Image (cartoon, rainbow, N blue to C red):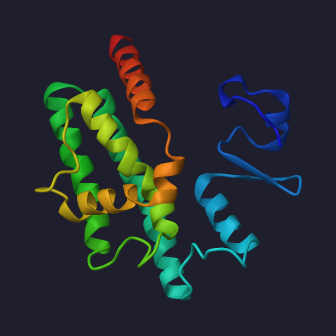
């Protein structure tokens, strides 16, 4: 296993990947990008807990919505962190529109089904990170009024024992994000 802070781009890390994080090294082979890693884990450890849906159509749908979230929603959410005033209100509305599209597609489903699944793993960081961004920026994106299903999913996901045990400490993320926002706004 290579231990390296990505910001330092140490030699061993650069040999493993084209400057992408995270990286999973399994049997000496690097696998980069979060969603690719999750799919690899599901395929490599068949005797473990299944992450991807069993049905091919459901797997395709899960991959589609993961990509939609990655390409569209992440890009819509990030500006909430860096904007202020009227510009922030507009980016909040845009983030909510994107998340509503995702929420509508998932009506009647827990993201991954009855148990934690692929979309839960891929989108789970929203449940922990987005409330921190809301607190740091003073914005409200995922509310009971605007995104009730997503808000409820946040609560269910964060209540899962293995999730609670593995999340980074909220207070540290809050402090880091406050400092980062101040730095970005002062630049």
Indicate whether 101 appears above or below 125.
below
Spot the residue most to the right.
Answer: 28
In the image, taking residue 161 as reference, residue 79 lies left or right, namely left
The residue that appears at 82% across and 38% down in the rendered structure is 2
Question: Is residue 151 toward the left or the right of residue 129 in the image?
Answer: left
Image vertical order of residue 118 relative to residue 75, above or below: below
Height in image: 127 above or below 18?
below
Q: Please state the horizontal and vertical placement of residue 173, each as a whole percent of the image.
A: 43, 31
Quadrant containing the N terminus is top right
Q: Nearer the viewer, residue 47 or 44?
A: 47
Number of marks in the rendered image:
0
Tell me which corner region of the image, top left, top right, bottom left or bottom right, holds residue 103: bottom left
Q: Residue at x 33, y 77 (%)?
A: 109
Residue 94 x %, y %: 23, 48
Q: Quadrant of residue 140?
A: top left
Residue drawn at x 74%, y 42% is: 18
Query: What residue occupies the far left of the structure in this picture?
Result: 145
Image point (72%, 78%), residue name: 46
Residue 36 percent coordinates (x, y): 64, 60
């Amino acid at each position: 296993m290579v231990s390296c802070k990505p910001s330092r781009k140490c030699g061993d890390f650069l040999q493993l990947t084209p400057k992408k994080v995270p990286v999973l090294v399994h049997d000496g082979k690097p696998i980069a990008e979060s969603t690719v890693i999750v799919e690899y884990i599901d395929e490599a450890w068949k005797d473990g807990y299944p992450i991807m849906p069993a049905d091919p159509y459901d797997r395709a749908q899960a991959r589609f919505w993961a990509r939609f979230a990655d390409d569209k929603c992440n890009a819509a959410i990030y500006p909430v962190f860096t904007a202020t005033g009227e510009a922030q209100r507009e980016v909040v509305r845009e983030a909510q529109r994107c998340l509503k599209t995702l929420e509508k597609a998932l009506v009647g489903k827990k993201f991954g089904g009855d148990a934690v699944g692929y979309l839960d793993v891929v989108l789970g960081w929203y449940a922990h990170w987005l409330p921190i961004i809301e607190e740091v920026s003073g914005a409200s994106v995922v509310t009971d009024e605007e995104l009730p299903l997503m808000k409820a999913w946040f609560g269910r996901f964060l209540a899962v024992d293995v999730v609670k045990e593995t999340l980074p400490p909220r207070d540290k993320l809050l402090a880091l994000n406050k400092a980062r926002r101040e730095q970005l706004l002062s630049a």
